[in-house]
Amino acid sequence: MEPTQSQTQYPSVTRYCRQEAETALLARNIGRSLEAYFAVNPQAHLNLSLVGDLGAGKTTFARHLIQGMGYAGRVKSPTYTLCEPYPFVVDSQDQSIHLTAHHFDLYRMRDPSEWQEAGFAEHFDAPGFCLVEWPEKAEGTLPTFDLAIHLAAGKEETERTVNIESLSKLGNAIINKLDN
């Protein structure tokens, strides 16, 4: 009998970053892992949550992750727009694959279904990935996540503890591609 998703144990990785540069490097490594995954699975879609208190560095982490995938433009906070799309290209053997990272910040949402009413649900099926800050504001109305990235500030301003938790087989594939 095959275990169900709730019975399956997926790995998690915890990294202690003493400097902002270490946190940025970790985010970029996740971006490179995503890029390698999409090079082999160009039609795939992943959902990632970013969890942490105000000031934990979620938006900065998102910026470095998206730039780690090769996006060269400015990555800004979607606090007031709810979603910012970032197109990127992954090179795979003899072709270039055009995908989109949708970066959500649900902090200012007043109603859990607001993201759906804004027409964002379609982004959760499109090739690429959705990166969601403050997913708890949607109170369970979001699709299942593949990775949960938890950030916690340390004693020093630049210190962060980052826990990357796989929640699916797809998330497990990304964790397995991370540089150690």
Image (cartoon, grey):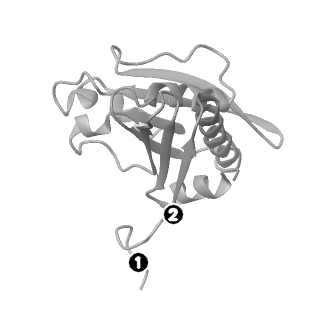
- Quarter of image, res 110: top left
The mark lying in front, picked from 1 and 2, is: 2
The residue identified by callout 2 is: 11
Instruction: Tell me what residue is drawn at x 41 percent, y 86 percent.
Output: 1
Disc 2, SS: loop
Query: Does residue 92 appear to the left or right of 113 in the view shown?
Result: right
From the top left corner, tell me how far across and down residue 10 is, in percent: 48, 65
Q: Is residue 167 above or below residue 55?
A: below
Q: Which x, y percent locates residue 96?
A: 75, 33
Say which residue label 1 marks: 3
Between 50 and 89, the one lying in front of the other is 50
Q: Amino acid at mark 2?
A: Pro
Circle 1/circle 2 CB separation < 8 Å: no
Q: Secondary structure at mark 1?
A: loop
Q: Residue at x 28, y 26 (%)?
A: 107
Residue 28 as seen in the image, left or right of residue 79: right
